[in-house]
Every structure is written in structure tokens, then in C-alpha cells.
Amino acid sequence: MTRAETPPNRSSGRVSAVASSATAATAGLPRLGRVVVAEDDPDICAVVVLALGRVGGLEVTACADGRAVLDLVPDLVPDLYLLDVMMPEMDGLETLRRLELDPRTAAVPVIFMTARVRPTELETYYRMGAAGVIAKPFDPLTLTHHLQRLYAESRHAEP
Amino acid sequence: MQELCSAQPLQVLLIEDNSADARLVRALLAEAEDRGVAFGVAWVTGLDAALDAVGRCRFDAVLLDLGLPDARGSDLIETLHAAAPEAAIIVASGQAADDCLLAQAIIRKGAEDFLPKDGLSVALLARTITTAIERRRTTTALRARTAQLETALIDARIGQLSWVPTSPEAALAGDLPRFLGVAVTGARLSMRRLLRQVSGPVRQSLYAAWRELAAGADRLAVVLVEHDRSGAGRGHDLLIETVVQRDAGGRIVRLDALVRDTAMIGHVERLEAEMITHLGHELRTPLTTIRGTLGLLAHGQDALTVPARQLVENAIANAERIDRVIGDTLGSSTDQPASRRFQPRRVALGPHLYDALTARLPDNAEQADRPNLTLTTTSRSLEVMVDAARLRRAVDCLFAQLHGRAGRADRLALEVSLQGAVAWLKLALPATTAHDIEWANAGNLETARPRPAVIPGGTTGLCIAVPLAA
């Protein structure tokens, strides 16, 4: 796996950004370290990788669709999955379903990152087991903070 | 031309009479494959050959030179557009690299983009073609959805009825006469004649509807049976929406009714929702990149001069303004979803909830299973719609915990629906004050007594308005 702060190209499907520092905003909460991102739009993917990696100090692995996310298991099981909903090959909802079926990833919270945030759509995401939703467009400077908060809530909510 | 029909990802028709230019474009597009975008390119030198090509194969994009031996000018775009409406047309011309008026004219004629031949690169060419194809597909899909929605809207409207009591005639339009079983060809007939012609059940329905209207209803749901010539009937669930004008004494002076098929209304609403979702996605995807890129630029403030930083911040404000307009127009909020923003507040559940819970518990529930809670009044409230089965399980678990009979859980989670959006009501049970319940998630709805409700999805349950502590 390559590591660089660039989005995945359409053929290779994934790339990583390495954490530079821990974010100070997360003090006292369960610490979010590694995130796998699935986003088919290369421009948005570049923004997310930079926002989480360079700005947020997280270790980010980016994929172009859900199938590439599943291919990472078991080599990489992150602290959190951040998935686009509409993707080619395998969309975010199907990816979530498969992650929940796999005991190695079932406990990893999944957060959707989508422009589809009508109430009925949110209902679907949460019914399927999403730990949260990031609405597009988002502020890249607060993205890590939102993920950290949702991650902490999902850890706290576990029985 | 055979290669055109192969399974290349993006098929491009290059219309170029200059062989050197054509070779350059083909070489650049071939090189693009190394960057992850593959093009299948067919090259023709004139309009006739181009029209022949688009007649035989489907192209994703047409790269067009406006100066061809057998045709010239921007009218070429309209001709090709008519022949291959699904293809994105991009004009590549050496005529005017900086001619804004020409570029505008070209776009107005239906081209997706304009490429000056000078300075062509792999990246520029590949990106221009792929984004033009994307735009074309989006536009085509939106037009198809719009046409589908318009058709459904027409289908959903059964007809209209207008009636002025002082007039001897009522006006029927659309399919309404057929639905009422009235054998009239004209649009108008007397109300007396109408009632005489309709069948007994229909007449009863109309009388019942009239009583409802006279009592002030403005929406009626009725079932009418449509009869064919053999006498067989087919039921239709109709929604009658009326606008009633009354005089000072409350008497109806004019009634206009729109009659729609309920099944079709549902279909229309689904189509509308799909269209809004699609449009929102198409608008917000590029906006996400713009907003995100600007945010990252603003973050690297050291690299920006003060005027540049101000420009970036202006651009961010305008991107957010566009997003708000999209949200207002499409009716979908641009805020980050709040369903999971747990904001713990301390409340106690009181008589209203107690009555509702005990009233809805199964008959075989033991008296000891009934919760004993108290109410604290507050200024805000949360309307919770709880599925009855889930509520029962949660109440059982809650009671067991309160009385120390079973389990070690110190919190519960209820799935609830807030105005159609699912959220979770979290109940935490502090060990020291067993009857206080600390819980999370907020609503901003009016306080109301618990009432039986139909949960979205069809199951029955309770709708509970619980005040929140400030």
C-alpha cells in the first residue's frame, strides 16, 4: 500500500496519509487514530484526505469504492469508517452491511458522508446501523472534530 | 469504425479535418489511459461522415472542429446535437482562444465546453471531456426525471369539479365523469341530473362528502367504484381537495374541488423525493469540493497574503450561501444532521407518560411491570414516536433496572422517530436517584399528550411529547 497525501486514482483505488500529530480537540475522549475513507469523487477524496490527515492528524486510508474498503480487511481494520453513500461497484449502504456481517469489522463504527440528508434518508442510514452522518458540503477544518465526537459517542453507546 | 463499438469506457468522436491536429488529439487521449481514464476514439473529417458515425454507434462525447470542409460555424453544434442528443459536444477550435463571445455562442448552441487548440495537454483534454460527459449525463437524467414527474402529475389528477349553488349546473372536467359513472360528454350538467345518473353507492358517497364539506372539511378521502360496461367495478381511493367560498352566514357560495388518485399521489411524491435527492446530490458534490478546497486554503494562512485570505474567506461565505439556497430550494437542511448530537438533559417522566405506558402495555403485563415515574415541567419538549413493541421491551428493561430485579445495564436505548427522522432516545439510570432519568437527544416540538400513532413504516405505537429540562 502506498502512503501519500493524495487522493486515490481510479485504477489503484486507495492511498494513505500518515498522521502528523494528535489533535488537541480530542483530549479526554476515546482517541480516534486510523480512519478508512471511501469516496469515489477524486476531488472530494483529496479534500477529505487532507482535512483528516494534514489538518486533523489522523492516519487516513482512502478508497474509491466499498469493495476496496472490504479488500483492506484483515490487513487494516481502522478505528472508524467514513463512507460516501453513492459509489460505483459497491455503495456505502452495502459496504456497511458487509462490514457488520464480518466479526472483524462489526464493532467498527461507520459514518456516512453524503449530500443525501433528507429525513427519510437519515432514517435509513441510522436504521442500518450508521454511527453518524456528515452532510456534504462540510467544513474541512472541523471534519476531524465531528468524526472524533461521533466516534466517542459510538464508543460510549456500546452496551 | 468497428472499434467504436468496442467496450471502451468513454467513446469519443473526433471531427477534425486537419490530420496533424487529429493525430495530436488521439495521442493525448491515448496517453490519458496512463492516468486512469481510457478513451475509445473514432476520427472523421467531415459532417456527413460524423452524422453517419453517430447514426451507427453511441458516443459519450463529440470533439468538434467548427471549420470543416463540408460545413462551418456554430450551427454544426445544433445539427450534431439533434443527431446525438446523449453525447456531450466539446468544441475544439484554433479560431479564438480568448474569444469570450464565441465561447458564449458555442455554449448557447448546446455545446458543453470550449477548448482552444493552442496549449492542449493530456490533463486539460481528459478533464474537459470527462466533466463534459458528466454534465451531459446529469442534465439528461434530470430532464428524464422531470418528464417522468410531469407525466405522473397529469396522471394523478383525475379531474375537477366546480359548483355554484345558485347555478343549476356543475362543471366536471378530466376523468371525473367517468369515475362517477356519469354518461355525459359535455363538461357541464345539472347537479340534480348528476345525482340522478350516478349509482346508489356513489350517490351515498357524494352525500357523505357533501355533509363533510358543509361541516367545513377541505380534504376528503373517498372510495369510488369505477364501472365498466359489463358492470364490473374497480375501486379507486380518491383524495378530494376543495376550496370553499362562504358568505357571511357560512353558506357555501362556490366550491372548487380537485380530485386526485391517492395511489398516484404516492407515486408523485416518491418521484418528487427522488428528484430532489438527485438534484441535491448533483449540486452539492461539486460544492463539497469547492467548499473543502477553500477551507483548506484558508487553513494554510501563512501562504496567503492578507488580500488573498480575504478573497478566500469571501469565496467560502459565498459557497455556504449557495449551499443554503440549495437547502432552502430543495427543502433539505444544510446543517450537519443532529440526530446523533446527544445533549444530555435531566428530566423525569410523569403522569402523562405513565398513563400512556400503562394504557398501552399488554393486558397480561404484571402490575409490578408498570413504571412509576414523575413529571418535571419544562419550557421545551420532544415528540417521541415509539414503536409499541420496542417501548414494551424498553419499559420492561427499565422497570427491571429500577427495581434491581435483573440486569446490570445502566442505560437503555430506544429507537425513536422525530418528524420522520430516526434518532435514539438514550435513557441513563443514575444509581442514586432511581426515579430520575437522564437522557439525551433534543427536539423542539410542541408539548402534547401521548397518543396512539402510526409510526412511519406502518407499525403502531405511541406519540409522546416529553418536556425537556432547560
Image (spheres, coloured by chain):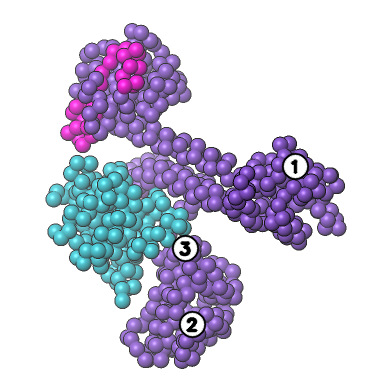
In this view, B115 is above or below A107: above
- Disc 3 and disc 1 on one polypeptide chain: yes
The answer to whether the residues at label 1 and label 2 have Cβ atoms under 8 Å apart is no
| Lateral position of residue A130 relative to residue B367, left or right | left
In this view, B218 is above or below B432: above
Q: Mark 2 sits on what residue?
A: B362
| Lateral position of residue A128 relative to residue B256, left or right | left
Labels 2 and 3: the sequence-earlier one: 2
In this view, B139 is above or below B47: below
- Disc 1 and disc 2 on one polypeptide chain: yes
Q: Amino acid at mark 1?
A: Ala
Farthest front residue in view: B230
Range of residues picked out in magenta: B29-56
Q: Amino acid at mark 3?
A: Gly
The answer to if B36 sits in the magenta stretch is yes
Q: Could you tell me which residue is drawn at 86 percent across and 58 percent down?
A: B249
- Give the Cα separation between the discs numbered 1 and 2: 53 Å
Camera-nearest label, 3 or 1: 1
Labels 3 and 1: the sequence-earlier one: 1
| Viewer-closest of B111 and A144 | B111
Q: Could you tell me which residue is drawn at 40 percent across and 21 percent down?
A: B83
Q: Amino acid at mark 2?
A: Pro
Q: Chain of mark 3?
A: B
Q: Is residue B15 visible?
A: yes
The answer to if B291 sits in the magenta stretch is no
Q: Could you tell me which residue is drawn at 31 percent across and 76 percent down?
A: A159
Q: Chain of mark 2?
A: B
Label placed on residue B457: 3
Label placed on residue B171: 1
| Lateral position of residue B155 relative to residue B199, left or right | left
